[in-house]
């Protein structure tokens, strides 16, 4: 296993952790102000039903992101796509992560700024190395 593959496995674990956080928000964890830039409506910290659905969809998207990264690093094989899809999807995800990092670091809530910001920054940097790797 290469160093890049190990880094991608770590990135996938971080992404999965954020996906679990999104799932917990969808299930009613009262930390709704710690997501969506603090702009999502909450009741006693619990996201409103619409934003709970959005959190659930976000969690699923994050699992897809982790899967694409793992496939790009040749750690797993995902049967629904070819190498070209994985290559370009990696770049799209990296772009999303960069924008997300900017939003997280500018967010008013400390969880978003000091926990999610460094997580998305770390995963974005690993993603850049992954996207630039020769395994495509």
Image (tube, rainbow, N blue to C red):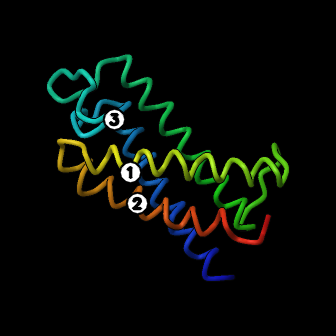
Q: Which residue is mark 1?
A: 101
Which comes sooner in the sequence, label 2 or label 1? 1
Q: Are marks 2 and 1 in contact (CB under 8 Å)?
A: yes
Q: Which residue is mark 2?
A: 121
In the image, 114 versus 99, the foreground residue is 99
Find the distance from the CA under tag 2 to the CA under tag 3.
Answer: 22 Å
In the image, 54 versus 24, the foreground residue is 54
The x, y position of residue 15, in whole percent, is: 48, 54
Neighbor class of circle 1 (other Cα within 10 Å; few <14, some 14-19, many 20+) is many
The x, y position of residue 84, in whole percent, is: 82, 51
**Secondary element at image label 3:** helix
Find the distance from the CA under tag 2 to the CA under tag 1.
Answer: 6 Å
Residue shown at 30% from the left, 30% from the top? 28
Q: Which mark is residue 131?
A: none
Side of 14 where 48 appears, left or right: left
Residue shown at 64% from the left, 74% from the top? 5
The x, y position of residue 85, in whole percent, is: 78, 47
In the image, 17 versus 130, the foreground residue is 130
Find the distance from the CA under tag 1 to the CA under tag 3.
Answer: 20 Å
Residue shown at 73% from the left, 62% from the top? 76
* Quarter of the image with the C terminus in it: bottom right
Instruction: Pick out the residue farthest to the bottom.
Output: 2
Of badges 2 and 3, nearer the viewer stands 2
Side of 26 where 85 appears, left or right: right
Q: Which mark is residue 25?
A: 3
Neighbor class of circle 2 (other Cα within 10 Å; few <14, some 14-19, many 20+) is many
53 to 104, vertically: above or below: above
Side of 52 where 98 appears, left or right: right
Residue 135 figure quarter: bottom right
In the image, 4 versus 28, the foreground residue is 4
């Amino acid at each position: 296993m290469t160093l890049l593959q190990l880094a991608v496995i770590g990135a996938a674990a971080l992404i999965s952790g954020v996906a679990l956080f999104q799932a917990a928000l969808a299930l009613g964890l009262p930390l709704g102000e710690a997501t969506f830039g603090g702009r999502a409506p909450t009741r006693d910290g619990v996201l409103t039903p619409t934003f709970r659905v959005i959190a659930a969809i976000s969690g699923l998207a994050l699992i897809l992101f982790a899967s694409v990264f793992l496939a790009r690093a040749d750690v797993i094989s995902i049967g629904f796509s070819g190498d070209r899809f994985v290559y370009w999807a990696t770049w799209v995800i990296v772009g999303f992560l960069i924008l997300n990092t900017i939003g997280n670091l500018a967010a008013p809530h400390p969880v978003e700024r000091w926990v999610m910001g460094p997580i998305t920054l770390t995963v974005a940097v690993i993603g850049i190395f992954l996207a630039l790797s020769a395994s495509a």
